[in-house]
Structures are given as structure tokens and as C-alpha cells.
């Protein structure tokens, strides 16, 4: 019989590193099918600037004083020849990819197959969600902050994969440009009506409010 083509994967490097966060969007994913990989020639950065002025259809963020920072920053991959970003390859079909697209509204899908390094046998095509140019303007990024719960979510995800694949957390830090400490703040997330995603995703309101009280 002819061999079936290798499956398409999404390279997860940000909040999708959290198994809980990943499964909230694509609940039929078997974590045993998710494998580590590297995106060569890139670094993990925080330069997707979410406009926090109420213009976005899904959510907004308030700080502990009820003030909305002008921009909230999310993870991205940026070309850096000397670096590599570690992450995991999530197998997707059309339905899963559609679910992920609905989640990653500030990102565009890019084919990164040629830059992927993995020990998996048949990876096939690899896609990554990369920040859209309209959301990565340097002047907007300079005015942004990172939600503490979001950063914790990503780092906790890296730790969970380190338990399965020792060395993952070390490689995570090697390929990540973390935000300055004074730009990481407690934020509460508020979903707009009709946004069905769980409030804890990307540092949700409930988690951030607990963080503020601790």
C-alpha cells in the first residue's frame, strides 16, 4: 500500500506550550502525539502588541487599579540567525487548524517547515502562528506590558514538557528574550460577550486576580 503523507503540524512556542491551554482549544489532541522541535534562526520574543483600547472583538485587560494599559504584549518568534526557539509540534487537521486560527486573532499562519529541526520521523508540513505586522509596530511594543499570569502560563508549559523531555526548560531559556521585570504586571482579563474561550487562557481574569491578591 502507498504510504499516507506525513501529517501537518503547528509549531507551538507560546501559551500553547501549556497542555491545559492547548487542550482548551483542541481538546481531542493526544499529548503523546506532540513532540519537541526547534525553529532554527529565530528567538522567542514578546512583541505582539494587543491594542487594549476596547477595539478588539474578544477581550481586554485591566491592571490592579482598573486602568487599561495601552498595549498588552504576547509571544512571537523573531528572526535571529544565531538563535533557535524550542517548542512542540502539534498534529492538526482542518478542524484543529480552524480552532487555532479562531484563537490566534493577532497572528498569521506561516509555513516554517524548512527551519524546523525535530527527531520525529515524519513531520510533514509545519505551520507557525507569527505576529501580524499591524500588531508588531515597535512604537506600540514600547508602550506595552506583559501579563504576569500569561508569562507564568508559558513558563509552566515549558516546565511540563521538561518533565517529559529533560533539557526542554534549559533550551526554552536559551532561546527566549524575556521582558524586563518592570514590564511584567498583574492584569485581569475580561472576555467580551460571545467570546467562548476560557477566561484563564493567556492569563485570564480569575488567575490574574488571584495573582494580585497573593
Image (cartoon, grey):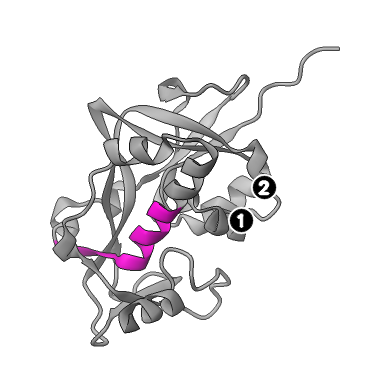
Kindly state the secondary structure of the residue where label 1 is placed. helix
Q: Residues within 10 Å of mark 1 (few under 14, many from 20)?
A: some
Q: Is 147 colored magenta in this rendering?
A: yes
Q: Which residues are magenta?
A: 143-156
Q: Quadrant of the C terminus?
A: bottom left
Of labels 1 and 2, earlier in sequence is 1
Magenta span: chief secondary structure: helix
Count of all numbered marks drawn on residues in the image: 2
> Residue tagged by mark 2?
29
The residue depicted at 37 percent of the width and 75 percent of the height is 208
Circles 1 and 2, Cβ within 8 Å, touching? The answer is: yes
Q: Is residue 145 visible in the rendered structure shown here?
A: yes
Secondary structure found at label 2: loop
Q: Position of residue 53 (x, y in %)?
A: 28, 75
Q: Residues within 10 Å of mark 2 (few under 14, many from 20)?
A: some
- Residue 180 falls in which quadrant of the image? bottom left
Residue 163's place in the image compared with 3, above or below, is below
Residue matched to label 1: 23
For the N terminus, the quadrant is: top right
Q: Residue at x 26, y 28 (%)?
A: 83
Q: In the rendering, at what x and y percent does residue 44 appear?
A: 30, 42
Between the residue at mark 1 and the residue at mark 2, the CA separation in whole angstroms equals 7 Å
Q: Position of residue 213 (x, y in %)?
A: 33, 84
Q: Residue at x 21, y 54 (%)?
A: 179
Amino acid at each position: 500500500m502507498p504510504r499516507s503523507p506525513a501529517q501537518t503540524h503547528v509549531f507551538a512556542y507560546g501559551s500553547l506550550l501549556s497542555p491545559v491551554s492547548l487542550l482548551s482549544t483542541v481538546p481531542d489532541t493526544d499529548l503523546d502525539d506532540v513532540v519537541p522541535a526547534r525553529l532554527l534562526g529565530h528567538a522567542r520574543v514578546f512583541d505582539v502588541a494587543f491594542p487594549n483600547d476596547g477595539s478588539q472583538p474578544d477581550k481586554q485587560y485591566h491592571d490592579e487599579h482598573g486602568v487599561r494599559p495601552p498595549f498588552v504584549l504576547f509571544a512571537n518568534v523573531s528572526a535571529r540567525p544565531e538563535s533557535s526557539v524550542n517548542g512542540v509540534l502539534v498534529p492538526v487537521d482542518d478542524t484543529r487548524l480552524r480552532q487555532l486560527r479562531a484563537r490566534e486573532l493577532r497572528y498569521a499562519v506561516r509555513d516554517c517547515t524548512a527551519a524546523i529541526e525535530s527527531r520525529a520521523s515524519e513531520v510533514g508540513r509545519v505551520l507557525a502562528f507569527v505576529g501580524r505586522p499591524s500588531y508588531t509596530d515597535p512604537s506600540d511594543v514600547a508602550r506595552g506590558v506583559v501579563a504576569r499570569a500569561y508569562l507564568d502560563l508559558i513558563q509552566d508549559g515549558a516546565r511540563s514538557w521538561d518533565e517529559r523531555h529533560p533539557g526542554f526548560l534549559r533550551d526554552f531559556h536559551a532561546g527566549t528574550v524575556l521582558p524586563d521585570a518592570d514590564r511584567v504586571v498583574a492584569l485581569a482579563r475580561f472576555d467580551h460577550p460571545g467570546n467562548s474561550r476560557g477566561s484563564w487562557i493567556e492569563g485570564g481574569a480569575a488567575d490574574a486576580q488571584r495573582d494580585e491578591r497573593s
